[in-house]
Amino acid sequence: MVNLFQSHSRSFEDNRHVYPVVSRRARGMSIGVDLCPGRCTFRCVYCSEFGALTSPPSDVPTHCAEQARGGIDLDLLRRELTAMLAAILGGEIFLHPPFDETPDAYRRLNDIALSGSGEPTLSPAFEAACALIGELGQSVRGQEPGKWPRPKLVLITNATALHLPSVWRGLDALRAQGAMEAEIWAKLDAGTEAHYAAMNRARVPLDRVLQNLLTAGRRHRLVIQSLFGELDGRPPSADEIDAWLDRLDALRQGGADIAGVQVYTVARQTAEPTIRALSDEALVAIAERVRSRGFVADWFGSGR
Ligand code: SF4
């Protein structure tokens, strides 16, 4: 079963943009949309896509007009999404390996996720993709209430480009139409500039990320995703964890709706050998500290 959960292959049959994932964090099926393949404003030390990323870190996030592995074909995206929704909601996908190993409790669709092998908010097709997903979500809404009880779009992002107007137009339109709930799962791996630089290796200042998280959390439900590992053989210091917790507190006090905090560690091959998985015990201790500050927290070890 570990292989099933660790399998986040971006390829599925002949699809170019859409792939299915059995998600342990979503506790169900997620339909991934690879919206900006190969482009990112971070160079995370733990990135499993690192070898395929092409754009250098920049101070100002820019759209990936010329994508490393081809642009988004919206007609193709529509066809692939329509077919994937039918395969999951109709159950056909669970007849085939490796999805025939999916536990019964996970045989429900949790979300459509803008995610993939790059930073989705950099895509010039972001707004159009949100509109398309909202339209398809509406079309199946209520047809399979047990299999997709809450049609939801999840944006998985490093938060560096959440200030782009196209991002808010896309997400706000979904909500305004009442088409789907939008949730933002955003990365925050550090509380200090030094740890942020070591983990995410971006020239986008941490303050920019924090401001974007605050804006995002005031408009949509926010789930914070934080990866901790042993960097050069050392776990994050107590001071670093304190600083990170203080950042969470500050976001909440500023009005961000933080629905949960996911503490996790390395589970796949990493860009650099200098980062290793943190022990389950250390992750549990961090999650407990998050809970002690009044947040909902979950943790995911390297083998869980
Ligand atoms: S934000 Fe994601 S895609 Fe970008 S470098 Fe980090 S792990 Fe890789």
Image (cartoon, helix red, strand yellow):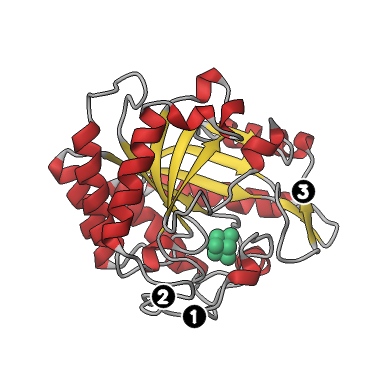
Q: Nearer the viewer, residue 51 or 292?
A: 51
Q: Nearer the viewer, residue 302 or 249?
A: 302
Task: Look at the numbered disc 3 and give the secondary structure of its residue.
Answer: strand
Q: Is residue 68 visible?
A: yes
Q: Disc 3 marks which residue?
A: 277
Residue 174, given in percent of the width and then of the height, sits at 21, 46
Q: Nearer the viewer, residue 230 or 145?
A: 145
Judge left or right: residue 65 versus residue 51: left
Q: Is residue 197 visible?
A: no
Count neighbours of disc 2 (C-alpha within 10 A) and say few if under 14, some if 14 to 19, many if 20 or more. some
The amino acid type found where label 3 is placed reads: Ala
Judge left or right: residue 20 versus residue 268: left
Sequence-wise, the earlier of marks 2 and 3 is 2
The amino acid type found where label 1 is placed reads: Ser
Residue 59, given in percent of the width and then of the height, sits at 46, 80
Residue 243, given in percent of the width and then of the height, sits at 61, 53
Q: Disc 1 marks which residue?
A: 58
Name which quarter of the figure residue 203 lies in.
bottom right
The quarter in which the C terminus is drawn is top right
Residue 185, given in percent of the width and then of the height, sits at 45, 47
